[in-house]
Amino acid sequence: MTEHYKMIRGELYDPNNHNLFALRIRCKKMCQQYNSIEYDNFLEKCSLMKKILKEAKGTFLIEQPFMCDYGVHISVGENFYSNHNLIILDPAEVSFGDNVFIGPNCGFYTAEHPLDAEHRKLGKEFAKPIKVGNNVWIGGGVSVLAGVTIGNNVVIGAGSVVTKDVPDNCVIGGVPAKIIKKLDNN
């Protein structure tokens, strides 16, 4: 079983495997290229981003700079917008629904390291997917951790750390993020 196969299945894998390392280098070079495109060259930025990501539907804009690990595990829906300094560590799937708006300096981290020191010393890690629903607004400086699913019609306050699943129609915030209020979905 390959390390890539273990990675996408959520099993312990070696991120320093030469094939995975080569995939990350390829992606990071494309991100570097993306970040150096002139700001107003939207066609070139869109074209390159479609090569980086697994899927990008319709209209989207990811402000520079942007970084990810593999890219091929990231999907963005229609009308997606991310402000500057989006970081996605994507050894597992990261999917964003339609009408998702992300503030500056946000991170989505699917990679985790074992609690067991012996496995950590070996450099082993595992990953869990992140899923973001439709009509989600994520404030600046938010971190979303591995394995989290964020429902539809959610607002996440700036600076929050999202460690657990978030139901539909609510405002959350804090460290760790908790529900602040329910939203009327009329």
Image (tube, rainbow, N blue to C red):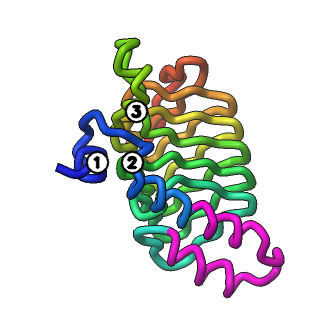
Q: Which mark is residue 3?
A: 1
Tell me if residue 57 can be seen. Answer: yes
| Disc 2 target residue | 17
Disc 1/disc 3 C-alpha distance (Å): 31 Å
Residue ID at (57%, 73%)? 49
The disc, 1 or 2, on the residue closer to the chain's N-terminal end is 1
Lower position in the chain sequence, tag 3 or tag 2: 2
Which residue is rendered at x = 74% and y = 54% of the image?
A: 84
For marks 1 and 3 on the same chain, the one whose residue lies earlier in the sequence:
1
Q: In the drawing, what numbered circle is on residue 166?
A: 3
Q: Which residues are magenta?
A: 28-52
> For the residue marked with disc 3, what is the amino acid?
Val
Q: Residue at x 61, y 48 (%)?
A: 87
Q: Secondary structure at mark 2?
A: loop
At x 51% / y 26%, what residue is drawn? 181
Label 3: few (<14), some (14–19) or many (≥20) C-alpha neighbours in 10 Å: many
Image spot of residue 93 (x, y percent) = 36, 52
Residue 60 position by quadrant:
bottom right
The spot of residue 107 in percent (x, y) is 59, 41
Q: Locate residue 143 relative to residue 13 in the image: left or right.
A: right
